[in-house]
Image (tube, rainbow, N blue to C red):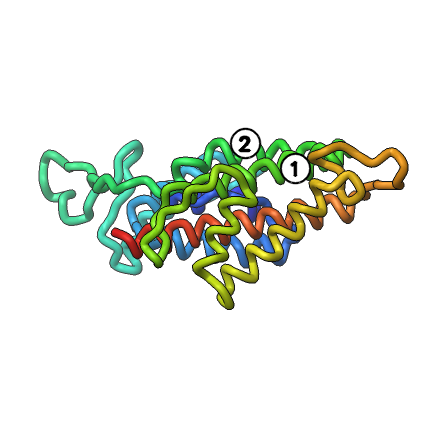
Amino acid sequence: MLEHFKGAFYKAAGHPHYRSSSESWAETDMSSAKAAAAENAPLFLEAFYEACLELTGDELFAPDASMINEICEKHRLGYVLKPPDLLLRDSLSVTSNTPVVVEDRSLTLAEKAVEVLQQSLERSEQLLGEGHLREAVQETLWVLESVTTAFRGVELPDGVAVQGKYFNQIVRELRRVSRGSTLDRALEWMTSLHGFLSSPTGGGVRHGVDMNATVTIGLAEARLFCNLIRSYMGYLLAEHERLNSQTV
């Protein structure tokens, strides 16, 4: 249930939805998702209403439009749900009942990539559940490598744009201008994990497995790798937006 609403709010905020590693983390992450979606009240209300609507059934109960409207009225929020429209409360006295128009905005990297990334992350979670542990880690590692390519062409603080095409090249360029920072340390950790998982004598998920070495990935290790990579992905997306905002 927490994941259901968390996904709805993150989608409204234009952020990718990563499955949390535990119930407590899911609750914390959902709070963050709500806060992000709440920056745009119409999208927040739409996301909450549609998430509730999806749950309505014989065994489940969720707030309907009338209940949500009562809460909006109680807290003096200027919106009224009249499915399929969201109306301004003041416009109810007007015959036309003009729906709220949400201004278009430029899509962020997270919004552009969310569908592709989400499909891969969901596939990784499915593979974990089916016991295909190496494949699950490989799928998640692919997403991390894909996210780093988004930095190609981004202008760095020294005025030079990222030129690298591959993970290691791009990471080196980013570290060059971020020595001693959190980004520098995070990229160092990412590089170490990427190298370990790529090595035939390490994780063996990218360049084959050394048949003379005993390389196994258990469920605990696979979930650790997947969760670490998802955390790094979220951080990289945030850094991408930060660097872009500095050059606008």
| Picture disc at residue 119 | 2
Task: Verify CB contact (< 8 Å) between mark 1 and mark 2.
Answer: no
User: Callout 2: few (<14), some (14-19), or many (20+) C-alpha neighbours within 10 Å?
Assistant: few
Residue 25 image position (x, y, % from top left):
60, 56
SS at mark 2 in the image: helix
Above-or-below relation of 2 to 133 = below
Which amino acid type corresponds to the residue marked 1 in the rendered image? Answer: Glu
Between 223 and 244, the residue placed more toward the observer is 244
Residue 12 in sight: no
Query: Which quadrant holds residue 132?
Result: top right
Residue found 26% across the figure and 45% down from its top: 80
Between 87 and 162, the residue placed more toward the observer is 162
SS at mark 1 in the image: helix
Horizontally, residue 50 falls left or right of residue 82, namely: right
Spatial CA span between label 1 and label 2: 10 Å
Residue farthest along the bottom direction in this orientation: 180
Residue 74 image position (x, y, % from top left):
30, 58
Between 247 and 88, the residue placed more toward the observer is 247
Residue 1 image position (x, y, % from top left):
57, 45
| Picture disc at residue 67 | none
Residue 172 image position (x, y, % from top left):
52, 51
Horizontally, residue 22 falls left or right of residue 172, namely: right
Residue found 24% across the figure and 48% down from its top: 79
Query: Which quadrant holds residue 27?
Result: bottom right
Question: How many tags in the picture?
Answer: 2
Residue found 50% across the figure and 60% down from its top: 183
Residue 239 in sight: yes
Residue found 59% across the figure and 57% down from its top: 188
Which amino acid type corresponds to the residue marked 2 in the rendered image? Answer: Gln
Which of the two discs, 1 and 2, labels the residue nearer the N terminus? 2
| Picture disc at residue 125 | 1
